[in-house]
Amino acid sequence: MTIAARELRVERWTPASRLGAMLAAAAGVALATFPFWAPSDIMRLVVEFACLLAIAQMWNLLAGYGGLISIGQQAYIGLGGYGLVVLANDAHVNPFFCVPLGGLAAAAFAVPTSRIVFRLAGGYFAVGTWVVAEVYRLVFANIAALGGGSGQSLTALIGIPRDVREAVTYWIAIALMAATTGGVYWLLQSRLGLALTAIRDSETAAESQGVDVARTKFIVYVAAAFGSGCAGALYFLNALRISPDAAFGMSWIPLLFFTVVIGGIGTIEGPIVGTLIYFVMRQFLSDYGSWYLIVLGVVAIVVMIWAPRGIWGLLAARTSWRIFPLAHIVRDPRVDA
Amino acid sequence: MNAMDTVVQGALLGGLYALFAMGLAVIYGVMRQVNIAHGDFIVLGAYSAFVVVAATGLSPFVVAPLTALVFAAFGYALQRTIINRTLGNAILPPLVVTYGLSIIIQNVLLQVFSADARSIQIGALGTASVALGAHLAVGWFPLIVFGTALAVAALLEFVFNRTSLGMAFRAVADDPEIAQVMGLRDGQLFAYATAISLAVVALAGVFMGIKFTFAPADGPNFLIYSFEAVVIGGLGSFWGTFAGAIILGVAQAIGFALNPGWGILAGHLVFLAVLVYRPTGLFARSAQ
């Protein structure tokens, strides 16, 4: 039996994903009102969450879609942070404008860096990016004008009223969270996103279908550096102080690996779920020393071996929930009826 | 400090780095994978020997081979039970699982031993030295480490190139599917490779613990040094790894002599320079 093509409908959105998107939009609007009523310690936490989520989304774009497993994204987090401090403290640029400028600085460094690290593949690429982050850490620790190993404070904010500073920082954070998540979603629906998804599924097959794998990976590497740089600048705008260890240190790495893997790599929802889990565990278990890291390490190993698509992958396989649907679903009215 | 002395001390430091790096080279040579927990296993080896020496009073030189045996058994079991489940075409699973192990080892050591630096004492031998001229003296212990590294490199070259086990290792590394068709069991071979790697790692860890003070978070740096030595040397040859480690040690020693803040950075820069100008390494035996 043949089916006339006009009887079939192709859909991307399902009722569940429409509801999810509406809830996400409502949550975004509610979050934006925080500066009018929420206490400032809550706002600082939301800003930190937004930074971590943005970094996780960028790592997911890089590792989950681009197949570039980097252990060195803290290079760009730190460059964004130092970009903010240098531009705001020394060049007297408005500190809030320095958030996107920090991202641009990170992206500018990513262009030549990619020429070096792209000579390595797979696991060697991973450790190579880590060496690059360490090089940046050691170089900044040797620059006396930037405070050397002990770093410096963000003095450019002196003179800005505290409530203004907190509110503007907060809104930038909400905007960054929306821009990175929405940006990845938009990117994946574009021609480049199609190429990326193909590379994720099989690099060889993508190449044989005419996808320019090297160029696509380069674009993704620089885009992820830009997003991570913005997040780094915002993080240190919120923290008010920077040092080479805080900026380029290894303590960023569990965030990259564990949140995205546990949440569900290669999905947009996964990093959100993973960052929520990471954040809640850190807030409630950090009184017990580093146990939360041990627990996260065990969970990441278990997830990687027995549920490699992560928590969101498990949910998505059993339900039709998609907050950011990317797949096209073919509907046949006669079957549905 | 004269230049000759700096180079000799750097080369001796490179002997320790060679021991660090050969364990990583074994795993990459057989599985084409990087063990992110490599440096943390070195630190774990040092803590294990530290505890045994403190509890039994045995000489660290007796404890070192015992630790190597225990680590070999541990490596075999770890590969068979956990890491073999991650091997396939995807590069992410082995990286995530070994990174997870890295974080678990670091933080368990932190909970058990605190962040205080420890060291393993070997008494008078720790400071004894032999004069090699009017202005140059080298310690006996660094010489022992250097000699051990040479012996390990020679042994690994022999195993990989002259034995049937080594032939099987190279076969699974080149083409796991064809090797399986020929009757080789890759899971078993990978477990042997990890056992060999961790035996060398344990030895390296005990020597590291004698030479330096160590703390739970030191592992990642040792992973990076090992990785740099392997890449500088080029893949496919343990002598290449050995030479890469010596170059790294000398680069760090020259950097430290110029400015204490530049030592490790100088090593990283030599690594990046090799990557830019000679991406297959200086002494690569094969193109891959």
Image: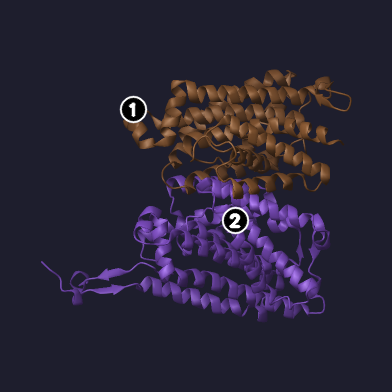
Chain colours: A purple, B brown
Circle 1: is it few (<14), some (14-19), or many (20+) Cα within 10 Å?
A: few
Q: Which amino acid type corresponds to the residue marked 2 in the rendered image?
A: Leu
- SS state under label 1: loop
Q: Answer yes or no: are tags 2 and 1 on the same subunit.
A: no
Q: Position of residue B199 (x, y in %)?
A: 59, 26
The residue depicted at 67 percent of the width and 66 percent of the height is A80
Of tags 2 and 1, the one toward the viewer is 1
Furthest residue toward left = A1
- Side of B3 where A28 appears, left or right: left
Spatial CA span between label 2 and label 1: 42 Å
What number of labels is visible? 2
Q: Amino acid at mark 1?
A: Gly
State left or right for residue A298 relative to residue A230.
left
Residue B76 appears left or right of A19? right
Q: Camera-side residue: A162 or B126?
A: B126
Q: Which mark is residue B183?
A: 1
Q: Which mark is residue A50?
A: none
**Residue position marked by numbered label 2 in the rendering:** A255
Quarter in which the C terminus of chain A is drawn: bottom left
Q: Mark 2 belongs to which subunit?
A: A
Q: Residue A210: which quarter of the image?
A: bottom left
**Residue A104 visible, this orientation:** yes
User: Horizontal and vertical percent for residue A115?
Assistant: 57, 57
Residue B47 lies left or right of residue B71; in this view the side is: right
Q: Quadrant of residue A284?
A: bottom right
Q: Choose top left, top right, bottom left or bottom right for residue A153.
A: bottom right
Place of residue A114 in the rendered image (x, y in percent of width and height, measured from the top left): 57, 58
In the figure, A336 relative to A66: above or below?
A: below
Q: Secondary structure at mark 2?
A: helix
Q: Position of residue B250 (x, y in %)?
A: 73, 37
